[in-house]
Each structure stands twice: as structure tokens, then as C-alpha cells.
Amino acid sequence: MIAEDTLNRIGRLIELGNAVLATRHTEGYSDICVNSGEFRGFRSASLSFLERIFGVHQTYYKEFTENVKHSDSDDTEIGINILRAAKAEIEGGWLFTIESQVSAEIFADFIALAKEVLDDSKDVAVVLACAALEDALKRVATKESLDVDDKDMSNVINALKAKSVIKGAQVSIVQSYVKLRNKAFHAEWDKIDKESVSSVIGFTEQFLLSNFS
């Protein structure tokens, strides 16, 4: 899972920082060049991680860049504390909140474009809408700790149904879109009508509002 992998990675970075500190504090240790190299590795790996997960404009990345510059104990400890704070936020669900916001923006763009081109090209519209719906279903399943890697849309729907994430009339409606999705992804354009495309666009739009707003 995304959060688990992220936590494992940040845990290893914290361990790396502690190893740098331990080396600095080793009695009789004098090879500052080696220690500086270890520190640079810790700093570079940490910045790469923080940039990828949080972005360069987020507080953790900026604080690390501004305050962790020198291969001494104080800077290393600051770096470790920044990583620990980031870890705590991820453990509290912050990462999924950000992912949901980003996903919502991407899916909303897909649906907006699908609606825009529907009158001129139902074929383009149905591909956009079905792609957005399938990806949204998988992301919701991941948030619910369901293993949907390499699962097809039908299996994802069944997993969400079993956990009551989708229920009632919603189940039969979304299941009906599996065939539409397959037709679209196999270029069976003559078997797709505009009304079905309009339906999946409307459903996906509501699904996004319910799960990503």
C-alpha cells in the first residue's frame, strides 16, 4: 500500500540519520570526510523523499533545506526530527488526504473534458469517463485497505461491495458500467450509445463528489 511503503521509507531515513549520529559520537572517531559523506547521503535521500511526497513548497521540505546543511550533530538531529514530524502526519492519514485532493482534481478534469466533447465525440468522452471511474474506484479501495493491485474493474467493485463502501442501487449501476468500459477499451464504438456515456459521466461525477471532496 502507498502509505505503508511511504512509512517504511521514512523509517529507513530516520535510521540512516541515527546511524550518522552514532558515527559522529563513536569514541575516537576522526574521519570527518567519511562522516560528511554519510551525512550528505542522509540529506540528499531525505530531500528527495520530502520533495516527492510533499513537494518543494511544503514546510517539511523547506525546513529541511534551510536547517539541515552541515554534517554536525545539531543539523542531523534537526533533520531526524523533521522526518519524525512528517512520519507522524502520514500515520495520521495526511497522505491520503492530499492524494484524494490531487486525485479529485485530475478526475474532475477528465469528467469536465468528457462532458465538453460528448456532443462531438461520444467515443472520446466514454474513454475519459470510464478511465476516471475505474481509477477512482481503485483509489477508494486502496484507502479502505483493500488489495486491488492488478484487479479488473469488476473485482474492484465486488471488493467495495463486500466492505459496504458501495451498496444498494449504487452497486447495480456501477456494475452496469463494466460492460461499457470493456466496449470502450476494445474500441467497440458501434455498441456504445450517447445516453450510456452521459450516464457514466453523471455517475462518476457524483462518485467523485462523495469520495474525494
Image (cartoon, grey):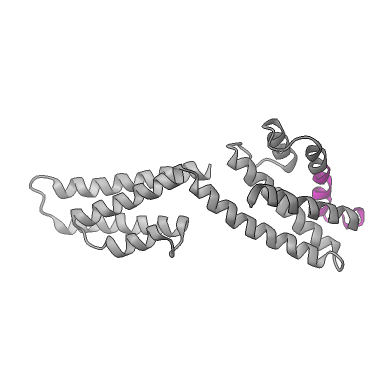
Front position in the image: 13 or 195 = 195
Magenta segment includes 188:
yes
Residue 38 seen: no
Picture coordinates of residue 210, whole percent (x, y): 69, 47
The residue stretch that appears in magenta? 176-193
Picture coordinates of residue 157, whole percent (x, y): 73, 39
Q: Residue at x 64, y 44 (%)?
A: 140
Task: Identify the image quadrant of residue 61.
Answer: bottom left
What secondary structure characterizes most of the magenta part? helix
Picture coordinates of residue 24, whole percent (x, y): 16, 50
57 vs 97: above or below: below
Q: How many marks?
A: 0
Front position in the image: 209 or 180 = 209
Picture coordinates of residue 35, whole percent (x, y): 19, 55
Describe residue 210's horizontal placement relative to residue 169 as left or right.
left
132 vs 119: above or below: above
Q: Residue at x 68, y 34 (%)?
A: 159
Describe residue 6's horizontal placement relative to residue 205 as left or right.
left
Q: Residue at x 80, y 61 (%)?
A: 125
Front position in the image: 57 or 154 = 57
Q: Residue at x 69, y 52 (%)?
A: 209
Task: Identify the image quadrant of residue 79.
Answer: bottom left
Describe residue 135's horizontal placement relative to residue 29 as left or right.
right
Task: Identify the image quadrant of residue 108.
Answer: bottom right
Magenta segment includes 150:
no
Describe residue 184's horizontal placement relative to residue 33 as left or right.
right
